[in-house]
Image: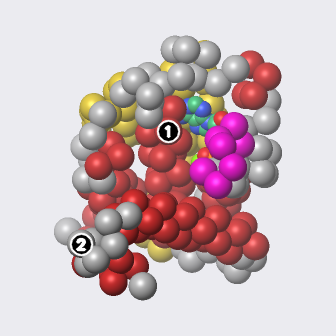
Amino acid sequence: MLCILHNHPTRMPEAPKIFNVLKDNIQRIDHIIKSFLTFGRQEKPTKEWIDVQTVLKNTLELATNLRQFDQIEICTEFAADVPAILGDQHRLTQVFVNLLNNARDAMAERGGRLTISYERDGNELRIKFKDTGKGISAQDLKNIFTPFFTTKEPGKGTGLGLSISYGIIQEHGGSLDVESREGMGTTFTIRLVIPTISSDHEKSKT
Ligand SMILES: Nc1ncnc2c1ncn2[C@@H]1O[C@H](COP(=O)(O)OP(=O)(O)OP(=O)(O)O)[C@@H](O)[C@H]1O
Ligand SMILES: [Mg+2]
């Protein structure tokens, strides 16, 4: 049906408009269903050795090629030689996608800059997503990790992204924190533990 509408706009002049409305709504439904499925999923996460930097880079490459990110300048500050950690790359990808989408939405009106940094401090791996978007009010800040809390218009957000992300980072033995000031921007910080045996794992690869 969508293809017919899209490929034959001359037969129905209003077809492109209808096509876009249908496409938008299908994307919304898809997003809501995916969020609910993840929220309800109880299975144990897999744990394997992963290079979080590669997972992050792959996610960024996919997301930032989308036109929704055209107005956003993306800067990366990635430290070299950060060892692998034990984790679930699909779940971590989900966290990164949600933080990217939230930053995009916060800068949707005026554009801005998203700085993603990745550094090691002892046995801690720290990943920051710092945006120059609209920020979060002190009142909302208390609620953002609560399931179904959203300030987005109906159909645009389920309010599950951050609560799912929080749970995923906790499952990894880490933490997810936020700092924000209204009108100034927001920084999310993920902290993950680098297991001491990780260096041995790295050595065994060479
Ligand atoms: N980077 C950010 N800048 C400003 N507000 C933010 C940012 N990230 C999150 N928020 C606020 O936190 C709320 C909850 O975020 P969360 O990711 O849980 O849900 P959502 O983005 O509204 O919906 P979903 O993630 O399900 O699409 C958002 O609606 C928004 O008000
Ligand atoms: Mg979100």
Establish whether ligand 1 lies closer than 8 Å to the Cβ of label 2.
Answer: no
Please count the marks in the image. Answer: 2
Which x, y percent locates residue 190? 54, 42
186, 84: nearer the viewer: 186
| Range drawn in magenta | 150-156
* Residue sitting nearer the eye, 202 or 91: 91
For marks 1 and 2, the one nearer the N-term is: 2
Q: Is residue 141 above or below residue 37?
A: above
Label 1, residues with CA under 10 Å away: few <14, some 14-19, many ≥20? some
Residue 20, position in %: x, y?
41, 62
Q: Amino acid at mark 1?
A: Asp
Q: Amino acid at mark 2?
A: Thr
> Which circle marks residue 10 in the picture?
2
- Please give the name of the residue rendered at 44% of the width and 28% of the height, measured from the top-left corner: 109
Q: CA distance from mark 1 to mark 2?
A: 34 Å
Q: Is mark 1 within 8 Å of ligand 1?
A: yes
Which residue, given by chain and number where applicable, does mark 1 sit on? 105
Residue at 37% in and 36% down: 116
* Dot 1: element: helix
Q: Quadrant of residue 1?
A: bottom left
What residue is drawn where x is 74% and y is 19%? 138
- As displayed, is residue 146 above or below residue 121? below
The image shows residue 19 at horizontal and vertical percentages of 40, 68
For residue 179, say whether it is visible: yes
Describe residue 56's horizontal placement relative to residue 136 as left or right. Answer: left
Instruction: Tell me the residue at 53%/51% (across/down).
Output: 98
Relative horizontal placement of residue 99, taking residue 168 as reference (left or right): left
Can you name the residue that lies furthest to the left here? 206
